Image: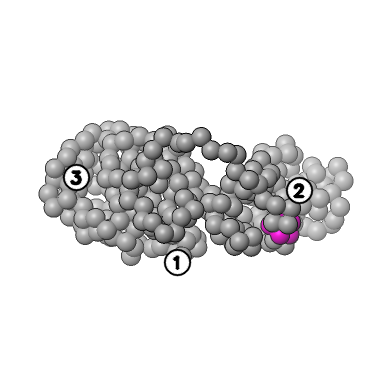
Amino acid sequence: MQELGVQDTLGILRQPWVRPARTSAGLGWKGLYLSTQAERPYRNAFDGARSHLLILHLDGPVTVRRGRRGLTDTRRVPPGGLFLHPAGTALDVELADQLRTVHVYLAEKTLQQALGESDRTVRLAEEFGVTDPLLEQTVLALDSVVRDPQPCSRTYADQLALTIAAQLAWRHSDRHRAPAATARPAGLTDRQFTVVRELMDARLSDPLPLEELAAAVGLSVSQFARAFKARTGQPPHRYLMRLRVEQAARLLRTSVLPIAQIAACCGFSHQEHLTRVLRAQLGSTPAELRQRG
């Protein structure tokens, strides 16, 4: 998959009434594009795009009208409300009020990847005004990564994208159904876990996409995420952050390397980032850990 960009969207983000605040452009996210912006009232028609569109309303309530080749449905969408539009579908839309939004554009392959299936198109529903607390919180978390991107946040962003895609595919598509009782997913084998752990250790200072970790053990991204958590009890991004924190603490106690250099070689963007994480996870600053020895 390639990184999505504004050229893969419906065209809304190119309109003069949209004032972007930040986007995921240049972050290397494959199969997903995020943009946060302020929108002024408008009415327009758009052709279908190659990507699916999820919009989270940050303000409200606002009046929205939508349809295909004509406005046929009107809703008052509250803060936290969602607007969902499937790929390849024309859209007529009217926004009656000013609004701040987060747009998430997803490639079809991203949805298939979340389901662990590559042989069936996932048809998303045309919805607006609905709420989904899991989607809302996950989109906000992904936006926070765009707001303050860090080299070590790539795995976390991939995990969030996988969660969004999976929730859309299972709860807002033609696959919608009550969850069936399933057996607990099998964890990574000893060999697979060794391969993943060695890769994480070797790449502590670099962004490490979930796709790369999954490929190393011959699994899809969704299969890998489930198997890794079944093995370790943690999602990959959290486990990787723990390794980075442990290595940073070890170097602070046993070496005379500058703190800024330790931050860089452990995958933190700068010394202040390392300080924030250590204070949150260990209750100590780098200087305090170094003094304790």
219 or 108: nearer the viewer: 219
- Left or right relative to 187: residue 177: left
- In the rendered structure, which amino acid carries the disc numbered 2? Glu
Check disc 1 and report its element: helix, strand or loop: loop
Query: Looking at the image, is mark 1 or mark 2 nearer the viewer?
Result: 1
Residue at 61%, 61% (x, y): give it.
218
Q: How is the image coloured?
A: one colour
- Whichever of callouts 3 and 1 sits on the residue coming sooner in the sequence is 1
Which stretch did the figure color magenta? 193-198
**Where residue 180 sits: x, y (%)?**
47, 36
Check disc 2 and report its element: helix, strand or loop: helix
**Where residue 284 sits: x, y (%)?**
74, 39
- Left or right relative to 226: residue 131: left
Residue at 46%, 65% (x, y): give it.
1
Dividing the picture into quadrants, the one containing residue 23 is bottom left
Write down the residue under mark 3.
66
Write down the residue under mark 1.
2
Write down the residue under mark 2.
246
Instruction: Give the spatial CA distance, label 1 vs label 2.
Output: 33 Å
Instruction: Give the spatial CA distance, label 3 vs label 2.
Output: 51 Å
